[in-house]
Image: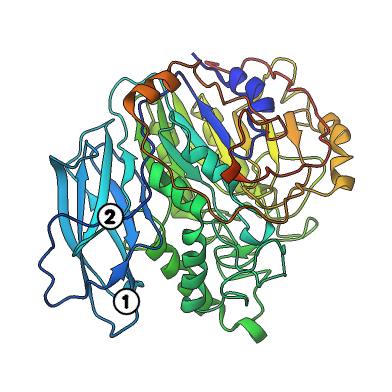
Amino acid sequence: MITRRDLLAGAGSSLLASAALAGCGGPSPTTPLDDAATPADDASDGATFSEAVDFLHGVASGDPLHDRVILWTRVTPRPGPSAPVAVRWEVSTGLDFAALAASGSVIATSARDYTVKVDAEGLRPGVTYYYRFVVGDLRSPVGRARTAQEGALDRLRLAVVSCASLAQGYFHVYREIAERLDLDAVVHLGDYIYEHASGAYGNVRPYDPPTTLRSLSDYRRRYAQYRRDPDVRALHQQHAVIAVWDDHEFANNAWEGGAEGHMPSSDGPWGQRRDAAVRAYFEWMPLREQPDGRIWRRFAFGDLADLVMLDTRLWARPRQEPPNSPGLHDPRRSLLGDEQEGWLFGAVTSSRARWKIVGQQIRMSPLWLKFNVDDWEDYPAARNRLLQTLATMRVNDVAILTGDIHSSWAMDVATDPFDPAVYDPATGRGSIAVELIVPGVSSPGHPPEVEAQLPEILRLNPTCASATLEARVLPPRRHPRTPPVRVVPAALWQRRAARAPGHRLQRRVADPPRRQPPHRGRRAERAPRRRTPARPVGARLNR
């Protein structure tokens, strides 16, 4: 059985990869899929609808529950008169789709940018399903999704990612995750896209559109560009994604009423820009939409884990304050807003699962050396209310998943980690939760002058078990033809599954690759790593 101590002890190595892969137990039977669209056997009756379309952006699934999962695709109309498109969707437990577990039809229109999103219901818990979309004689690529397990569960494995700047590099880690055969879902903690103009933040790849995103058309084009990336398509085709937004889906350091990166004089009214970004996000991301636009929601994985996803960005967040602002410690100051905060407290205190996992965007644990004001330290009253609730209600086994800061951290969460009477790093006394911060998919880490301070940072911050801050030096180009995810015969999968559980879990991105197919191109070259051994931080369970 994995404990919080084990989680921190192992995080020093597992979090050095470009995605944190946290789990319990061995692999589950999954099958990579063929990415090519194929003609359908039977043409649908679409006399009043256009059938002149292509599937250029792949397929996706998300938000798996015990009996349903979101399915997504986009049909791209070919040049000619614009018309609605009748799209059929099918779900099966077999790749031949001989017996359908669920099916239906939906109309794609320009009102939603020809994106298609359905909630496939009536499924069985803990089952791997395959799905596809059909328009006339054309079939989409086949996607794969797994529903959440009910009842007793002894293994859950999630990949956790954030911060994918297309201009800063390539999404190799998405391809690696797509090739994993042992994952239940992917958790994306935000910055799925970046809003910058070409060359403003990275110059490895140009953006479409090349200007800063401001309008609905701008945001739609940027999502379309990302979803044409072969590694992004592979990720979504193979795994269900549970996602929340952060700031760069809108503008840098966004809050409820604006953003540091939003200038009304040049960018227009914030409300219009925010609404355009929200609309494009809901169109292009495979998440279950709510009438009020909330993205905070809860997922149950048997009796092993409850996953709570938060919106620390837009729902009710007031503007960030400088460190010495008199309003910083206002006891009424909130990060989540009263409604979301109350919902979170209820979710974690009422959970009967072994693990309570909180997926959110910004760093929660205090640091002696602050990197910015865009974290929970800028909302100390809100953080204290959460930690006091966890302590008072004796909520054990809480793990916080965080993105945003393009670096890897494994740390205890305590109300006052700098007071020896409150927190003891040797025994873990006073620890209320653990926080695992994952690095960026491609967004760069901290510069060498900050990396050089790492030993001092760890010395001054007793809750830190390990950290890696270095920036990555990315290759200038890679082979443009990345092959699709392929169907793997069952016998081959069984040989792969026979390997030791978690055989890839401890790999670091700096380690030599086990294999290097010609199509993959060069892996990212990296600056010399300052390695700091993982430090176990005492037992903190069943207090």
Lower position in the chain sequence, tag 1 or tag 2: 2
The quadrant in which residue 191 appears is bottom right
Q: Residue 133 or 38: which is nearer the viewer?
A: 38
Residue 521 vertical placement versus 328 (above, below)? above
- Left or right of 505? Residue 65 is left
> In the image, residue 376 lies at what x, y percent?
65, 48
Q: Residue at x 82, y 43 (%)?
A: 369
Q: Which residue position holds label 1? A: 111
Residue 267 vertical placement versus 13 (above, below)? below
**Three-letter code for the amino acid on which mark 2 is drawn:** Thr
The nearer-to-camera label among 1 and 2 is 2
Q: How many labels sit on residues? A: 2
**Three-letter code for the amino acid on which mark 1 is drawn:** Ala
> In the image, residue 386 lies at what x, y percent?
55, 40
SS at mark 2 in the image = loop
Q: CA distance from mark 1 to mark 2?
A: 27 Å
Q: Which mark is residue 487?
A: none
Q: Which mark is residue 38?
A: 2
Instruction: Verify CB contact (< 8 Å) between mark 1 and mark 2.
Output: no
Q: Residue at x 57, y 26 (%)?
A: 505
Residue 315 visible? The answer is no
Q: Residue at x 23, y 57 (%)?
A: 39
Residue 73 visible? The answer is yes
Which quadrant holds the C terminus? top right
Q: Residue 55 or 250: which is nearer the viewer?
A: 55
Q: Residue at x 51, y 38 (%)?
A: 177
Categorize mark 2 by other alpha carbons within 10 Å: few (<14), some (14-19), many (20+): few
Residue 44 vertical placement versus 401 (above, below)? below
